[in-house]
Amino acid sequence: MTRIPMTERLDQGWFTEVFDSHGSAFSLMIKDKLHEVQSPYQHLEVYATETYGNLMVLDGCVMLSTRDNFLYHEMMAHPALFAHAAPKRVVIIGGGDCGTLREVLKHPGVEQVVQIDIDEEVTRASQRYFPELTASNDDPRATLKFEDGVKWVESAPEGSVDVMIIDSTDPVGPAEGLFEVDFLTRCHRLLADGGVLVQQSESPLYHTGSIIRELRADMQRAGFDSVATLPFPQPVYPSGWWSATLAGKGSDVTRFRERDAAAVEFPLEYYSVETHRGALALPPFMRRALSA
Ligand code: SAM
């Protein structure tokens, strides 16, 4: 998918990201550019918008806004954690804004979370412009590493992880390797029996017959026993609709600890036992495209 920023429109008070290959675009009215840096890996910008709070953009692609990031971060963390019988050791690859990390740390049973993002600039910008997402970073259970996730999984010990969360950018540039079958095979090796992996898997409307279908096939090739794609709304991403694909090692990710999910005491904005159940009910067009 080609995602192109229409930076010239900034002069007129709008940030626009164009999705050329799908003939669509998404715009937000902006007040100001707050931050801009070229890291060794990507071009990072932060804007203040009129109605969506702050907006983080990497290489011209929208990453998150203050207003709607809860949808993505809750759906990247809670379905996978409740699909596991008793998650204690969690790894996040990517996720540098720390929103997913914050959600994982809400689970009292989690004993350690290691986050590996290639780009420290993303975390530094998030600390400054999205402080609510990084508020749990000092939790003693959390370790933040800044290195390539593809390399990190090559050397991590076998069977040492309960839940792996691949919270990456789109499958181009530094994140390309995170969508390859070899990477998934290494993740499978890192997971203990009963382990769960979840990967952000792009738009159900635009990518069910391509990226999502290929990712699910690669997960099966990598040795996973069960796969489930959970769609959820995400207004700032292409098509306004996004997905997380779960894979189970010796476990069935189409099931989850419903009683525990219904009894949570921590604050949630989107995830609930009902939204999890609803997300597991794939729309017919997706079911058809995935079984074709
Ligand atoms: N899922 C959101 C989206 O699609 O817009 C993005 C969330 S997060 C900001 C994505 C993170 O993945 C970025 O911080 C980026 O640095 C990180 N990333 C990309 N490639 C990586 C790699 N090979 N290893 C570790 N982190 C990587």
Image (cartoon, rainbow, N blue to C red):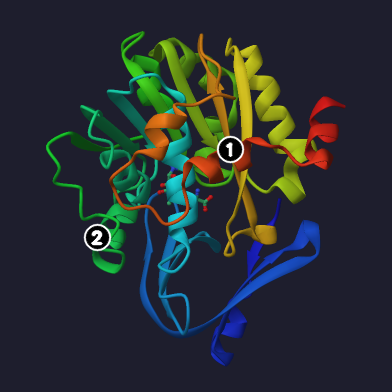
Which image quadrant shows ligand 1? top left
Distance Cα–Cα, label 2 vs label 1? 33 Å
Q: Secondary structure at mark 2?
A: helix
Q: Residue at x 67, y 25 (%)?
A: 216
* Residue located at (31% from left, 53% from top): 267
Q: Between label 2 and label 1, give the one nearer the viewer.
A: 1
Residue 250 coordinates in the image, percent (x, y) = 51, 8
Task: Work out whether 235 lies above or below 98.
Answer: below
- Residue 147 image offset from top left, x and y in percent: 32, 35
Q: How many marks?
A: 2
> Which residue is at a point 61% across and 44% down the rendered structure image?
243
* N-term-proximal mark, 2 vs 1: 2
Labelled disc at residue 277:
1
Where residue 127 is drawn, which disc sits there?
A: 2
Q: Secondary structure at mark 1?
A: helix
Q: Quadrant of the C terminus?
A: top right
Q: Quadrant of residue 164?
A: top left
User: Residue 208 appears in which quarter of the rendering?
Assistant: top right
Q: Is residue 76 visible?
A: yes
Q: Amino acid at mark 2?
A: Gln
- Respond yes or no on whether mark 1 lies under 8 Å from ligand 1: no
